[in-house]
Amino acid sequence: MDEELSRLVKMAVSQINAGMVILDANHNIVLWNRFMQIHSGVSEGEIKGKNLFEQFPELKGTGLKKKIQSVFLLKNHAFTSWEYRPHLFQFANPHSVIGDDKWMQQDCTFSPMIDETGAVTHVCLSVFDSTNTAVYQKKLLRASGSLMKQRNKLAEINTKLEEAQNQLLQSEKMAAVGQLAAGVAHEINNPVGYVNSNVSALEGYINELLQILSAYETCEPALDQNNELIEALTQAKKSVDLDYLREDLGDLLKESKEGLDRVKKIVQDLKDFSHVDESEWQHADLHKGLDSTLNVVNNEIKYKAEVIKNYGKIPEIKCLSSQINQVFMNLLVNAAHAIETRGTITISTGAKDHGVWIEVEDTGSGISQEKLPRIFEPFFTTKPVGSGTGLGLSLSYNIIQKHKGTISVESEPNKGTKFHIWLPIDIESDDNSDANVA
Amino acid sequence: MTRLKDQFNEDRRDALQEVVNIAMGQAGDSLAKLFGTFVELSIPKFHLCDVTELNQVLSKNDAYVEKMTILRQPFSGQLRGEGIALFNNSGVNELASLMGYEGEVTFGNEREMLLDVCSILVGACLNGVASQLEISLSYTAPTIITKDTTIEEFFKPESIQWRYAMIMEICLTLEQYDFTSNMLLFLSEDSFPPLMDKLDHMLDEL
Ligand SMILES: Nc1ncnc2c1ncn2[C@@H]1O[C@H](COP(=O)(O)OP(=O)(O)OP(=O)(O)O)[C@@H](O)[C@H]1O
Ligand SMILES: [Mg+2]
């Protein structure tokens, strides 16, 4: 090579704005250019002929020897990238003003140096300062990361909104049902009222008529027995079966009155259940709520299950009783649905920890281990399309939460399911929090 | 396309196969030395195909249905193209110690190691070919394209710039370590004329 060119190449190697190191087959340093000298603070004279791994022990065990070996063996190029290995040499970050990294980020290349025979005699290591790229890349990553977070948050809020809307819909539905029930109750109340008083009056009149009839009958023997009239009378009595009629009249009236009482009771239950007029927090007797709810859902239950009540002694609690009744209704209907042919539903209550617990246990199909954690999710249902919305339990869960109570479930497939509810006596009293801690 | 297929006649195909076989022999040797374990390299298969046929050609290999880590290493010079290395994500820990990474396998050194293996494989295969054909190649740093993608999802014809390519398929196995990597070397269309010239040159010398 002509001398001028050789001088220029040397100069270029020295001046190039990248690190250049040449290693021999034993990893001894043959060349250490200006860039390396400036950033490492070690002059070429000090380091020339020394072993790279002895000068920089932190490079041991990091796969570098293999990389270099691969270059010698395969005439290969090997690389490191700041993304996966921020730096090979720990040089201070020259971009100390903009950078938040303490050290210079580096991209490095190991290239083979081949002689005339085609053998690799040395490896040339070039070190490029990638701090700028790295800084921007990291900024971008952070920005897209926080965008991602915001996006996820929005998505979360969206689902929450959807849930809230569904619950709103469901409680609106329940409110509408309640109002309808109250309306029906009111409409039935009037006719039932006058039928009731009419039946009472009828009972009086009939008793009086029967008395008069008896009086007439006592006169019968005094009549001429061969008279045609007496013949007709006997005939008439026989054809209507007067004795039976007397007996049956009493029974009919009694049954009618019982029926009317039942209608009155149902009307009262409908009113209690809907509580249209008391949408406020009030002290309520949960046994009353359970009983009126049982009456309302009686039709769904009576062919499926025998209901056993294990009521304990419980205080009244402050609650929105129409909502608590909704919870009872959901649990009772679910229990009845879970029973295939015939079973029992056991309702137990008791007092505990400044509150009241209620358990609804059935001998139904039970819930499998995989499904159990999901039953309180809105829209989770195993019922056929059109027959279950899957909102019952999620709504119940929210009502109980609103009352600062707890609802939990235990279930064993093919054995049955038990829902346990606990409600504080007074949600505003501080006692409850103490009780929960204790 | 047919013109290219005609150009790649039997003589030239045989010559290239010969060159590649020798190169693979050398590569296997060097890789065994490097890894310190027996290395099995399959006999390379060639495909000359249109991008639209790419998936059809590749789908003949069962290995490509799995989800894989895909890396690329571009090369340029008289031959231009890309080496695509496919790893099926097994045997990574063993490979790390084989490659001289000590301690726990972290995100960073696992990635770097896969990149190392990619450039080693591409280099081992191509350098042997290049030196026999007396051409010089230069390499750009490899990059990880995706993790967990099948090759079919990856090679969408619309995302490839070339119309035609020559593909060389090689499979590397380190039996002792349950490690397999498939490699595809793509030669771009414009590398054909110089490659054919070089092959003719070799044939003349025989
Ligand atoms: N007592 C129970 N026994 C067995 N499975 C039950 C019981 N209670 C609830 N489940 C299961 O939980 C699911 C969700 O119940 P949820 O009351 O929320 O909705 P649903 O009854 O399906 O529909 P609806 O909105 O009409 O109440 C039910 O579909 C059922 O699979
Ligand atoms: Mg339900």
Image (cartoon, coloured by chain):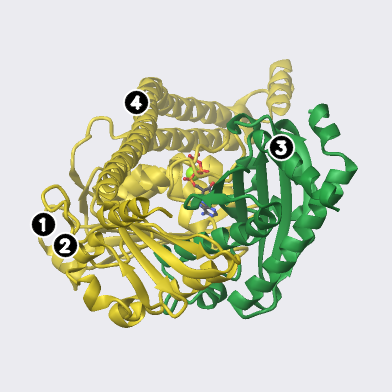
Chain colours: A yellow, B green
What's the distance in space between the residues labelled 3 and 4, CA to CA?
A: 84 Å
C-alpha separation, residue under disc 2 versus residue under disc 4: 33 Å
Say whether residue B63 is left or right of residue A269: right
Q: Which residue is drawn at 67% across and 50% down?
A: B184
Check mark 4 vs ligand 1: CB closer than 8 Å? yes or no.
no
Is circle 1 on the same chain as circle 4?
yes
Residue that numbered label 3 is attached to: B192
Q: Real-space Cα distance between discs 1 and 4?
A: 32 Å
Q: Quadrant of residue B188?
A: top right
Question: For the residues tagged 3 and 4, is the chain the same?
Answer: no
Q: Could you tell me which residue is drawn at 60 percent across and 67 percent down?
A: A117
Contact (Cβ within 8 Å) of mark 1 with mark 4:
no
Name the residue carrying label 2: A432
Residue B196, given in percent of the width and then of the height, sits at: 76, 40
Residue A162 at x, y percent in the picture: 37, 33
Q: Which percent across, then down, holds residue A136?
A: 26, 44
Query: At label 1, which amino acid type do we have?
Result: Ser
The residue tagged 1 is A429
Q: How far apart are marks 2 and 3 (CA)?
A: 84 Å
Q: Are marks 2 and 4 on the same chain?
A: yes
Label 2, residues with CA under 10 Å away: few <14, some 14-19, many ≥20: many
Name above or below for residue A415 compared with residue A272.
Answer: below
Gap between marks 2 and 1, in whole Å? 6 Å
| Circle 4: element type | helix
Q: In this view, does B148 lie above or below A385?
A: below
Q: Are marks 2 and 1 on the same chain?
A: yes
Left or right of B58? Residue A317 is left
Question: SS at mark 3?
Answer: helix
Dot 3: chain letter: B
Mark 2 residue type: Asn
Q: Which mark is residue A363?
A: none
